[in-house]
Structures are given as structure tokens and as C-alpha cells.
Image: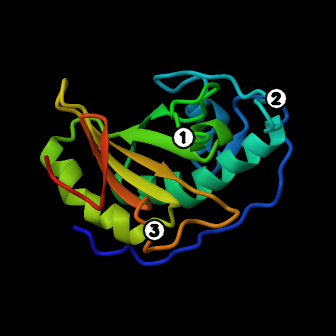
Amino acid sequence: NNTPPPGKSGIVIAPATWSGNYDDLLSPNFRVRAFTINAVFPNQLIAYGTFSINDRFSNLKALAINVAEPMLAHFGKFNINSGLRNKTSTKKGISQHITGQAMDIQFTGWSYARYWENAAWVKDNIPYDQFIFEHSDKTGLAWYHLSFNQNGNRAANDHTKVMTMFRNHYDPGLHRH
């Protein structure tokens, strides 16, 4: 499915100050800890590089409100495997996980077929900056990488907006493997 997604801008969040409590709400259903220390790959919310704690906190709030909440409302509970990261995972630039703008999520009990069936809905209904349908060729597991950039999401026709990752190779658009 290489049809460009509709352009959705989402809700811009005013800069916020974090109290230091991991139980602080980012949105009605998500606390800071869900994106940080309770993720499968835990990281503390700290200043990192040129990003202050409050920059990263504000980005997490925007991600929770614009992406996590609509995903929860439509699909139900999911696990945030990786939210905020304190080291980069990319060789090119800075991962949006570093800035607090990205999360990798999985749904308990979902088959690969179910991820595939629902990818089109995610593509067409969530105001993301980037959506990557990711696969592990070793485990057969799938998950969604979603990001939100309140300074401006990528254009709908940007070849990196919707991608599929399989065997550590990224292709534009959604592809079933």
C-alpha cells in the first residue's frame, strides 16, 4: 500500500515542566513511566544532548495525546516496548526516540496478520510524523513504530513518512512479509 496518507497535523502542546514524578500524567491514560522506566527497554527522563528534560517531557506529552490516545481508543491496550531512549539507535541523525517523539508498540495476542490488517487504519487515521511497520525475521513478531513532531509532521508524500522495516532494511510504503 503506497498510497500517501492523509495529511494530519495533530494537536500542538504548550511547553510543559516535568515535576520529576514518573506517575505524572502525559494524557488521560498515559503516565511518564509508560514511555520511560516501564517500557521493555527502560530509560530515565533526563536531559540528553541538546534536549532538556522539559523539551523531552513536552514531546512525550504530544506523542501521548496525538498518537497513543487514539491508538488506545481504537485498538485497546498495548505495550510500549520502546519510548524514550537515552542513546541513539540510528547512524543517520538523531532517533526520534531520543527527543521523546517516538514509540514502538505491540499488542498482546496479535498475529502478524492482525498487524497487517490494521496497518492501513493506522496509516490513514493517526496524525503521526512517521509510521514504520516493523518486523523481526528471527522471531516472526511485528510492531508499530510511531512518532509525532509538534514542530511539523513530515509531508504526506515524503518517502520516509510510511515505511516497512524487514531484516533491518527500510522500504517506503506498507509491505507484507
Q: Is residue 154 left or right of residue 59?
A: left
Percent of width and height locating residue 124: 36, 71
**Label ID, residue 92:** 1
Query: What residue sits right under mark 2 in the picture?
Result: 20
Question: Quick one: label 1, few (<14), some, or many (20+) residues within 10 Å?
Answer: few
Tell me the amino acid under the disc marked 1. Lys
Residue 158 horizontal/vertical position (percent) = 45, 68
Up the image or down, 119 lies above or below 61; here it is below
In the picture, the disc for residue 158 is 3
Q: How many marks?
A: 3
User: Regarding mark 3 in the picture, which secondary structure is present there?
Assistant: loop
Gap in angstroms between the C-alphas marked 2 and 3: 37 Å
- Residue 69's x, y, as percent? 52, 55
Q: CA distance from mark 2 to mark 1?
A: 31 Å
Q: Residues within 10 Å of mark 2 (few under 14, many from 20)?
A: few
Q: Say which of marks 2 and 3 sits in front.
A: 3
Query: In the picture shown, does residue 152 fall above or below 92?
Result: below
Numbered disc 2: secondary structure: loop
